[in-house]
Image (cartoon, coloured by chain):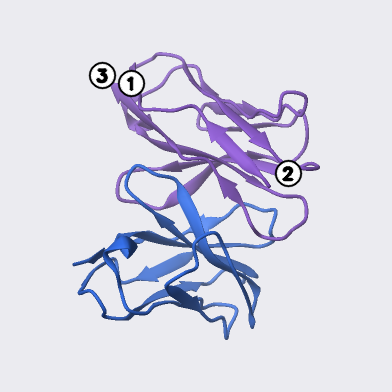
């Protein structure tokens, strides 16, 4: 059982480049989330989805976009990368909005 | 809005010492409460949870009790081990099923032999 799978694990981007962080879950969870974790800090919610075709903004959505065309996949798109987007990105999923979240291993992104 | 306040770290203990990490929350109604643990280089994983007042969550020797009257969910362990060194996050999920969990800032625990 793979759980939540994120790719890539590491990436270095130049300022202004774009990329997509991939996230897939095989638990048939309705809810999926993207968080960022800055060094020594907690998690900040970027975007979340309560089901296929439905997405909503979290605390820090600026500079990011998401889509949810299937239950399994929830990619995060970074447009025009900026140094402020250097962070570790975690994808997570949960069965409902009240149940525990399952996290991927994270993507460490550096923008130079 | 909802919020979670955790005891600031870092916390450094000797092996076999008693651990308490304080967590208090602000939320309407009866949220679900969680403790997650993050080992170096990994994602968060659920340590324990409680879904209603006076529930006690427990796992791997860790315990936390959902205290509605003090809006707290303190994490405790009677005897820590070096392998417990990690970052611990307190979190809540609101009772509205809206899917917007709130996490504390995390507490780094280092256990020395």
Q: Alpha-carbon distance for marks 1 and 2?
A: 30 Å
Q: Secondary structure at mark 1?
A: strand
Look at mark 1 in the image and give the residue it sits on. Answer: B12
Mark 1, other Cα within 10 Å: few <14 / some 14–19 / many ≥20: some
Q: Kindly tell me whether residue A2 is visible in this rendering.
A: no
Q: Measuring 32% from the left and 61% from the top, which residue is drawn there?
A: A84
Chain designation of label 3 = B
Residue A99 as seen in the image, left or right of residue A108: right
Give the answer, above or below, for where A58 lies relative to B19: below
**Chain letter, colour purple in render:** B
Tell me which corner region of the image, top left, top right, bottom left or bottom right, holds residue A17. Answer: bottom left
Q: Secondary structure at mark 2?
A: loop
Question: x%, y% of residue B89?
Answer: 49, 39
Residue B95 as seen in the image, left or right of residue A14: right
Do the residues bearing badges 1 and 2 touch, measured as CB atoms within 8 Å?
no
Residue B9 as seen in the image, left or right of residue A51: left
Along the viewing direction, whichever of B6 and A100 lies nearer the viewer: B6
């Amino acid at each position: 059982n793979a759980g939540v799978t994120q790719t890539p694990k590491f990436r270095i981007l130049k300022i202004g480049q774009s990329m997509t962080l991939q996230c897939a879950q095989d638990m048939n969870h309705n809810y999926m989330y993207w968080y960022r974790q800055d060094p020594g800090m907690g998690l900040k919610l970027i975007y979340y989805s309560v089901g296929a075709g439905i997405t909503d903004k979290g605390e820090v959505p600026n500079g990011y976009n998401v889509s949810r065309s299937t239950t399994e996949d929830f990619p995060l798109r970074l447009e025009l990368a900026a140094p402020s987007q250097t962070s570790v990105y975690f994808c997570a999923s949960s069965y409902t909005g009240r149940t525990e979240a399952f996290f991927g291993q994270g993507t460490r992104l550096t923008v130079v | 809005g909802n919020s979670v306040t955790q005891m600031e770290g870092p916390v450094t203990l000797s092996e076999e010492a008693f651990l308490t990490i304080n967590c208090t929350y602000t939320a309407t109604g009866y949220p679900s409460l969680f403790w997650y643990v993050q080992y170096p280089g990994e994602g968060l994983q659920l340590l324990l949870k409680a879904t209603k007042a006076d529930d006690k969550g427990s796992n791997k020797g860790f315990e936390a009790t959902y205290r509605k009257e003090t809006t707290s969910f303190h994490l405790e362990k009677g005897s820590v081990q070096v392998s417990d060194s990690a970052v611990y996050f307190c979190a809540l999920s609101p009772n509205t099923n809206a899917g917007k969990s709130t996490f504390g800032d995390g507490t780094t625990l280092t256990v020395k032999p």
